[in-house]
Amino acid sequence: MTVEQLSASEYNPFYENYIKSVPKEISLGILFLDNLKEISALLEGLDEAKLSYRYEENKWTIAEVLQHLLDVERIFQFRALSIARREAQPLQGFDHDAYVTFSGAENRSLESIKNEFEIVRKSTSFLFDSFTNEMLKQVGQMNGSSATPRAIGFIIVGHTKHHLKILRERYSI
């Protein structure tokens, strides 16, 4: 399954930039693994002392950005699972700023973040591998819009790419 197979009706237009950032010809399973390699390479070159760096007052620290990526991936895993299992209740949004505020990211070590990224992403990959084609195309309600698990998978990759770009450009890592 590639991003070209998605219909715009499978996700909220808010996620369009994430979807567009995903290479069109690469399957979701490969994208998950390639994206993990990209994260791992970035983290390997990061100095632990830099975790508390923020490029501007009131912007997230590097540790907070990384924790945000982990939190969002877990939330989107849950959303994909819920929709694949035909959850009848609409899935609500969340306040990502509040999650960051109460994340405790400032207490994390670089090693713990690296390990968690690997485990969370592998978990995401296993989850999506377990879905049948029918499950991947199941439509549910997420944050006031229709969504499918397969669109959520590409959103996870695109969201990570978005923040990796910010880390490179604004945080110089």
Image (cartoon, grey):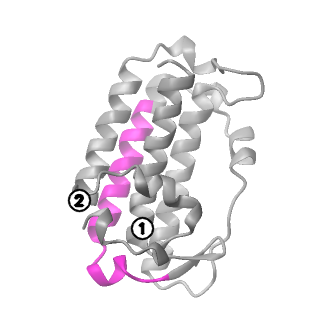
> Toward the viewer: 28 or 2?
2
Tell me residue 135's x, y (percent). Answer: 35, 81
- What residue lies at 63% left-to-right and 17% top-to-bottom? 53
Q: Which of disc 2 and disc 1 is earlier in sequence?
A: 2
Secondary structure under tag 1 reads helix
**Which residue is at 71% across, 21% downward?**
56
Nearer-the-camera pick, 121 or 4: 4
Asked if 3 appears above or below 33 in the picture, the reply is below
Residue 12 as seen in the image, left or right of residue 83: right
* Residue at horizontal 44 percent and vertical 17 percent from the top: 46
Q: Is residue 110 above or below residue 164?
A: above
Counting from the top left corner in percent of width and height, residue 103 is at 67, 40
* Real-space CA distance between mark 1 and mark 2, rounded to the nearest whole angstrom: 12 Å
| Mark 2 residue type | Ser
User: In this figure, which residue is indicated by the disc labeled 1?
Assistant: 151
SS for dot 2: loop
For the point 52% across and 81% down, which residue is it? 140
The residue tagged 2 is 27
Residue 72 image position (x, y, % from top left): 55, 51
Question: Magenta includes 36?
Answer: no
Instruction: Judge whether residue 137 is colored magenta.
Output: yes
Instruction: Decide: few, some or many residues near mark 1? Use Cα within 10 Å; few <14, some 14-19, many ≥20.
Output: many
Task: Give, as a single range, the part of the protein colored magenta.
Answer: 114-139
Query: Relative to 92, does residue 37 appear above or below in the rendering?
Result: above
Amino acid marked by disc 1: Ala
| Front-lying residue, 145 or 136 | 145
What predominant SS class does the magenta segment belong to?
helix
Q: In the rendered view, does 131 fall on the left or right side of 17?
A: left
